[in-house]
Image (cartoon, grey):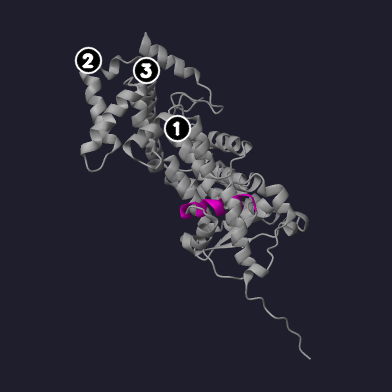
Amino acid sequence: MDYSRQNISNYYLYDTQVENLFIAEYMASAPGEFVKAYLLASMYAQLNMPADDRIIAKAAGVAPEKMEECWAYWEGRGVVRRIYADPEDSSSCRVEFVNLREEVFGSREPAAKKSAAARLDDKALARLYRDVEAAAGRMLEATEPEEIASWLSEYAMTPEFILCGYKFCAARRRSTRCRYVGTVLKDWKSKGFASPSQVEEYLQGMDRHYDLQRKIFKELGFTRSATEEEKRIMNKWFDDYGFDLEKIREACGKTAGIANPNINYVDAVLTAWYKESGKTLEDSAQLLTSKIEKLYEQDRQQNAEKTKQIRSEIFTKIPRIRSILEEIRSCSFSVSKYLLMGESGKEAAARERAKIESLRKERDGLLTRAGYPLNALDTIYTCSKCKDTGQLEDGSRCSCYKDKMRLLTQ
């Protein structure tokens, strides 16, 4: 005798299971639209019904472009895993809903660490490092991959969140040093942020000109957010030119006769008015900060050229040095990969670290025998404390900043 049960054809007659652990520990602190998307997608998954981000976004009332950020948020919390058939193709992603009870009570390894290891294979991890290098405008430092891996595992940060930190520090803080970026990221996490959109909302609120910028965009009929370059230009109108909002609105009115109103057109109008007033940019005391930053930029450029020349000289005299540095870099990436594997990767990570130590000793021996100091390959800085940024790792001004200020004002 066989046994069977009639299938229910109407999904309204089913129940969707949501773990109390999710409700108590994750739901209350999550963005509302992300919760709606999670619940709807979970319903589709439990019913084995076909769906995609477009369907979920429409049903949940979420902007389609926010779905990527939504899954990045939940993945960072260890609630879902994103599995890619092709790590280079984001459209090949499949979202797997984690059994939280199993993760928390059925395993010795924290869910956040396991999800980090599961979602970032070699290609995905390499892609994150490439993106970070592009945002920072430099190669990763020797131990930086290992540090980034700790942010992924220990703090449950998503790759998107980490990349957001590097971009922010590069654009607004003029420093992308690993420890400094880490301080910024950990501060954001302590404030309860887990996604780039939450960070952006916070930063907009902290921007003293945000409300003024919003009013200017409304005047021009723009509904989108301002780019960093547009914010810089608008801040110039207030800070450098000293115009009030009414004067800027008058300039915005000049765009009424053009087909595509834009910030650059308004900037040209205001710049012309500013010059007609008989003032010059150099006469403005408010440009002191800009002048100081130019001095730092000159230091960075000159020191970068000196560093390049010395390294080129060493690589020519001791070709083995270049390959040693490449091997150290490769081993550092491997260490970060093994750290994401938790306990199972500790032994392999230790072996890679031993290789790095051996390579460093070989490098130091070659430098010494050739008559170079051990720090000959290090980046040259005029100020080693702030690394020519004027800002220390805790965000305070470096003493050299006052020196440059005195130089300009004496």
- Seen from the viewer's position, the closer of residues 247 and 293 is 247
Whether residue 410 is visible to the viewer of this picture, yes or no, is: yes
Q: Position of residue 179 (x, y in %)?
A: 56, 35
Alpha carbons under labels 2 and 3: distance apart: 16 Å
Query: Which residue matches tag 1?
Result: 172
Q: Is residue 366 visible?
A: no
Give yes or no for contact between labels 2 and 3 (Cβ–Cβ under 8 Å).
no
The residue where tag 2 is placed is 278
Mark 1 or mark 3: name the one nearer the start of the chain: 1
Indicate whether 204 appears above or below 29: above
Q: Quadrant of the C terminus?
A: top left
* Extent of the magenta region: 64-78
Looking at the picture, tell me which residue is in the foreground, 291 or 141. 291
Give left or right: position of 372 versus 2: left
Q: Name which of mark 1 and mark 2 comes first in the sequence.
A: 1
**Residue most extreme to the bottom:** 1
How crowded is the residue under tag 1: few (<14 C-alpha within 10 Å), some, or many (20+)? Answer: few
Residue plotted at (23% across, 32% down): 254
Q: Dot 2, how many residues are within 10 Å of its Cα: few (below 14), some (14-19), or many (20+)?
A: few
Q: According to the image, label 3 marks what residue?
A: 286
Relative image position of residue 394 (x, y in whole percent): 56, 27
Image point (60%, 44%), residue name: 151
Report the label total.
Answer: 3
Q: Nearer the viewer, mark 1 or mark 2?
A: 2
Q: Is residue 68 magenta?
A: yes
Badge 3 element: helix
Residue visible at 58% across and 70% down in the picture: 49
Amino acid at the residue labelled 3: Gln
Is residue 403 found inside the magenta-colored segment of the image? no
Judged by depth in the image, the label closer to the viewer, 1 or 3, is 3
Query: Which amino acid does the dot numbered 2 rest on?
Result: Gly
Q: Amino acid at mark 1?
A: Arg
